[in-house]
Image (cartoon, grey):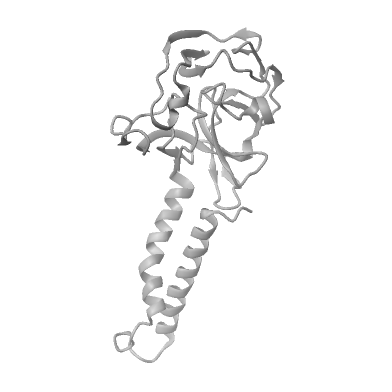
């Protein structure tokens, strides 16, 4: 069990609910009319906050959760300072805190941008793109991706111009990659070394990579992501803030992620 924000949100919901519920029960058992009793301050706070924390808990646990992008590993798709929403139910309904799946729904598809608990440290959330599905053979050589022995098509667009906290990626090759029907942008720096090799994806696990191929700590380095580590699918940028560029990025707000 991770003692993260979800844990404390659940505790707050239970505590405020118990306090308010116990007070209502005592009122019902008391001979003194409720109108004549002064509500204790702690009960007043519990009554006020219980509906709020309950709604936040339900929305955040079962519908959508906000995340902030802290690194450039998903450039140019996601920039440092982007605030995204993650669909929490598309890969199944899970109980908060213990993350146990109770309802099976969809499975990740190739090309999905997923948030997951880092296998080496589950208290840390990572975001990457699904490249390999269970049973796939993934190879990466000379900056070229292969899926089941088929080279994945890459088309050069331009030399990338980074801004703000992503300025260091200026000059990288901006390519369009076609993941067997799912097109997306990637960045490559030909002069930088990278991890190469062949990887076979075990059942129940997923091979993930960052779109910023030469600046991403992903499955090439630490292995695959177990299905139980999945948090959800990123689908929307609701705000973007980069203090090293222009502050609020109005042009990025409302972007649907693909």
Q: Position of residue 214 (x, y in %)?
A: 57, 21
Q: Is residue 236 visible?
A: yes
Residue nearer the viewer, 216 or 132: 216
Q: Does 132 sit left or right of 44 as displayed?
A: right
Please state which of residues 234 and 251 is positioned toward the viewer in this rendering.
251
Taking the spot 39% from the left edge, 34% from the top edge, the residue there is: 236
- State the image quarter where residue 237 is shown: top left
* Residue 21 position within the rendered picture, expressed as x and y whole percent measured from the top left: 44, 74
Q: Position of residue 144 (x, y in %)?
A: 59, 11
Q: Is residue 241 above or below residue 15?
A: above
Q: 121 or 21: nearer the eye? A: 121
Q: Position of residue 165 (x, y in %)?
A: 43, 32
- In the image, residue 57 above or below residue 229: below
Residue 257 position (above or below residue 146): below
Name which quarter of the figure residue 139 lies in: top right
Taking the spot 52% from the left edge, 54% from the top edge, the residue there is 6
- Is 182 on the left-hand or right-hand side of 236? right
Rendering quarter of residue 17: bottom left
Residue 223 is at least partly visible in this image: no
Residue that sits furthest to the bottom in the current view: 31
User: Which quadrant of the rendered structure holds the C terminus?
Assistant: top left
| Mark count | 0
């Amino acid at each position: 069990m991770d003692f993260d924000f979800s844990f404390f949100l659940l505790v707050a919901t239970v505590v405020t609910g118990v306090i308010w519920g116990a007070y209502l029960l005592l009122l019902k058992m008391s001979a003194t009319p409720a109108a004549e009793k002064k509500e204790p301050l702690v009960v007043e706070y519990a009554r006020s906050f219980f509906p709020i924390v309950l709604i936040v808990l339900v929305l955040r646990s079962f519908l959508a959760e906000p995340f902030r992008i802290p690194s450039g590993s998903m450039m140019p798709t996601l920039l440092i300072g982007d605030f995204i929403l993650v669909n929490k139910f598309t890969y199944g309904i899970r109980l908060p805190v213990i993350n146990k799946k109770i309802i099976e729904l969809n499975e990740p598809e190739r090309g999905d941008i997923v948030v997951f608990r880092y296998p080496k440290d589950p208290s840390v959330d990572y975001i990457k793109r699904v490249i390999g599905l269970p049973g796939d053979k993934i190879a990466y050589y000379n900056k070229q991706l292969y899926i089941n022995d088929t080279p994945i098509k890459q088309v050069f667009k331009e030399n990338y111009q980074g801004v703000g906290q992503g300025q260091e990626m200026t000059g990288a090759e901006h390519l369009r990659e076609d993941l067997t029907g799912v097109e997306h942008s990637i960045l490559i720096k030909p002069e930088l070394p990278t991890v190469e090799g062949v990887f076979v994806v075990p059942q129940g696990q997923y091979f993930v990579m960052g779109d910023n191929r030469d600046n991403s700590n992903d499955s090439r380095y630490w292995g695959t992501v177990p299905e139980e580590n999945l948090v959800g699918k990123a689908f929307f940028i609701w705000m973007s803030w980069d203090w090293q560029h222009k502050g609020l990025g109005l042009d990025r707000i409302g972007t649907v992620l693909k």
